[in-house]
Amino acid sequence: MSDHPRLSLHVPEPEFRPGAKPDFSGVTIPRAGTVRRPPVDTAPEEIRDLAYSIIRVLNRAGEAVGPWADQLSDEALQAGLKTMMKVRAYDTRMQMAQRQGKTSFYMQCTGEEAIACAFQMALEPGDMNFPTYRQQGLLIASGYPLVDMMCQIYSNSRDPMKGRQLPVMYSSKAHGFFSISGNLGTQYPQAVGWAMASAIKGDTCIAAGWIGDGSTAESDFHSALVFASTYKAPVVLNIVNNQWAISTFQGIARGGSGTFAARGHGFGIPALRVDGNDYLAVYAVARWAIERARRNLGPTLIEYVTYRAAAHSTSDDPAAYRPKEESEAWPLGDPVERLKNHLIVKKLWSEERHTQAVAEVEAEVIAAQKEAESYGTLHTGPKASGRDMFVDVFKEMPPHLRRQRQEAGY
Amino acid sequence: MPTMTMIEAIRDAHDVMMARDDNVVVFGEDVGYFGGVFRCTRGLQQKYGRARCFDTPINESGIVGTAIGMAAYGLRPCIEIQFADYMYPAYDQLVSEAARLRHRSANDFAAPVTVRMPTGGGIFGAQTHSQSPEALFTHVCGLKTVVPSNPYDAKGLLISAIECDDPVIFLEPKRLYNGPFDGHHDRPVVPWAKHPLSEVPEGHYSVPLGVASIRRPGTALTVLAYGTMVYVAEAAAAESGIDAEIIDLRTLLPLDTDTIAASVEKTRRCVIVHEATRTSGFGAELSATVQEMCFYHLEAPIIRVTGWDTPYPHAQEWAYFPGPQRVGEAFRRVMEA
Ligand SMILES: Cc1ncc(C[n+]2csc(CCOP(=O)(O)OP(=O)(O)O)c2C)c(N)n1
Ligand SMILES: [Mg+2]
């Protein structure tokens, strides 16, 4: 036997499991307005601290404070609130539709609405998102028709994906929304490649990659960072840290790294960490990173700190692995409530106006749902055609597929 | 004897092996505290501790790569890839490393890893939760590939896989987890408890790798099937009235060619059924094998019934799935030839 002490395996565990009372009072959250806003051409090594802080604009009183504030017009703020409300109403209706058996599967982004909705407002036509399944806010904020989204959820006769894809796997080149893959992380390097193509061609558009905290563990995440770093690709690399990857807490993917943002440091990529439930902060940080990309200064890594308030998907019940009260106890609040309060403080909004807006948004979503359902749902009414299964495997259908299609009776 | 679902039988195999052998470690995405998205490892972390059953980062090549390192050290990792559709990032570790370690090191090192993964469709999982990639494993020399079709076999084969000194790919047809699904998706699910093969002995027993099982003796034709397709073939036999002999291959590699050849020599006709896409699927290997071994006994061309050569669709799932009607038609065609 050697004289060395015996080794043992370290396996991280979240602080709170079902039965425990979640208490986040130990988590340090910087006061809104206290984190500096460096010029976009600052060298990455001079802003390493920003990967360990949290950029916040909205304070507890609902005021926008500090160097990252005052970037959005009153109208834009009101529109932002309505977009987030629309995303939430859409999620609620589609979740319900799944429970009613009208489709097989659904994924909500409850509590994370500000991230996609605000980010989209900082992009320009021609830019391309490489989203995950939890960025429906990008599409809705870009004005993509709700009816088309719902037809995809229902896999019906008007499904833009022709019934092929799992619900929520949208695609729209016209709206800067790259086709979603179910395989995690694969699209992060693709976003870098899209951005490199823009640079190769001497164009002006940029790309945005999206990934969840859990998926940053994938090798593809690291592939993306090394290519982005080497070629200074005009890309914004977004990490949505909603604390959970199905039942696995973020500490399993983060390991010994203090934050996810800090992953950028080894690659010399400037990294920012931002309050993902603060619409104004998300927008300001997105603008900063997009400007860097646009000025050919290279990539930026952004970690959005948020919380996945709902289940992972309709196939999941989080009560089995985290305390029910954890979502309520989460210290960054609700993004919709926070922007609403800010607008009320600015006298741009009121409780009455809000109630009215809730009703308007709901009516819009319900009307879209009625229309979408008139084109069929997964199990009833008009359907995506079986013939479509064979189309688009290749640009031109090879003989063996033609034969198989015939054999299948289409 | 207790009846078990396939999930319970798989969990029980882990439990038996972890209790018998301290070297058995179990890990994968959501496998630890929660017990896996299909709950196949539920309770193991609580019973055996976090160092023997744990959650991993979402990185399939990391899961397989670390398992190889552990196995070479002397452990017996039994790891889970959440869906077979997500094994691709791990493919290099499986093909270039696990499969060849023993050979390239002249038996100096080996990688006795069991890689479990749910496979197949039938749950409206679309293209990323439905694939059947078995042929991507059987084509690799150095990997054994197993596909159980019932709780009794699942437990016995998983125990054999964990005890095997070489890497084993263990594909679990997810549509069978909770009942013997025969392709009649419009009928209520039959629970395992009503099926004789849900009777699972307690404790340790094994079903040997490389031995097929004749699930329905018959004289008219031989069906080569595995996983969910065993039940689809049974339904097709019952509905067509054709006296098919149904062979559940259970292990695709090594393949039980003796059982196959004896059956085809008897029936003189052969239908091969799998859910995976057709071209270069495992059916092609089976067809070639039957032709090589039984050519002079065959009275009809061998027919394959498979998934179409397209990604697994969502809405069109049942147009894709080779159900009892398509299999029954193949039976009739092979009888008429
Ligand atoms: C390559 C791959 N491995 C595993 C999965 C299964 N899976 C789907 S979502 C998920 C968790 C992802 O968590 P995170 O990246 O944090 O995103 P979130 O769901 O929280 O938005 C897992 C493991 C997958 N889709 N692809
Ligand atoms: Mg997450």
Image (cartoon, coloured by chain):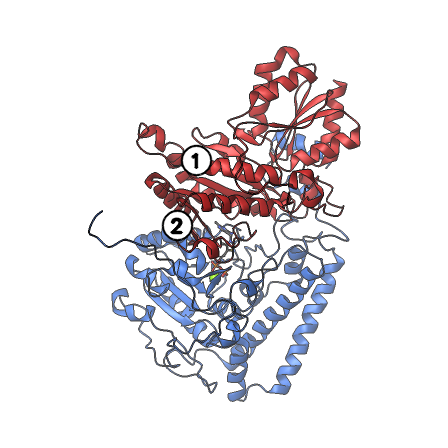
Please state the chain letter of the residue tagged with numbered disc 2 in the rendered image: A
Residue situated in front as seen by the camera: A306 or B55:
B55
Q: Which of marks 1 and 2 is in front?
A: 1
The residue that label 1 is drawn on is B167
The residue depicted at 79 percent of the width and 32 percent of the height is: B239
Q: In this view, does A75 lie above or below B302?
A: below
The label on residue A219 is: 2
Q: In which quarter of the image is residue B219?
A: top right
Q: Is residue A295 above or below residue B126?
A: below
Tell me the colour chain A is drawn in: blue
Please state the chain letter of the residue tagged with numbered disc 1 in the rendered image: B
Tell me if residue B33 can be seen: yes
Q: Do labels 1 and 2 share a chain?
A: no
Q: In this view, does B301 lie above or below A74?
A: above
Crowdedness near tag 1: few (<14), some (14–19) or many (≥20) residues, C-alpha within 10 Å: many
Report the amino acid beneath label 2: Ser
The residue depicted at 40 percent of the width and 62 percent of the height is: A251
Tell me the colour chain B is drawn in: red
- Asked which secondary structure carries label 1, the reply is loop
Image x and y of residue B212, in percent: 59, 27
Q: Is residue B269 rendered to the left or right of residue A87? A: right
- Asked which secondary structure carries label 2, the reply is helix
Image x and y of residue A319, in percent: 56, 65
The residue depicted at 62 percent of the width and 66 percent of the height is: A91
Which image quarter is the C terminus of chain A in?
top right
The label on residue A324 is: none
Residue situated in front as seen by the camera: B110 or B288:
B110
Residue situated in front as seen by the camera: A170 or B44:
B44
Q: Is residue A156 above or below residue A114?
A: above
Disc 1 + disc 2, Cβ < 8 Å: no
Crowdedness near tag 2: few (<14), some (14–19) or many (≥20) residues, C-alpha within 10 Å: some
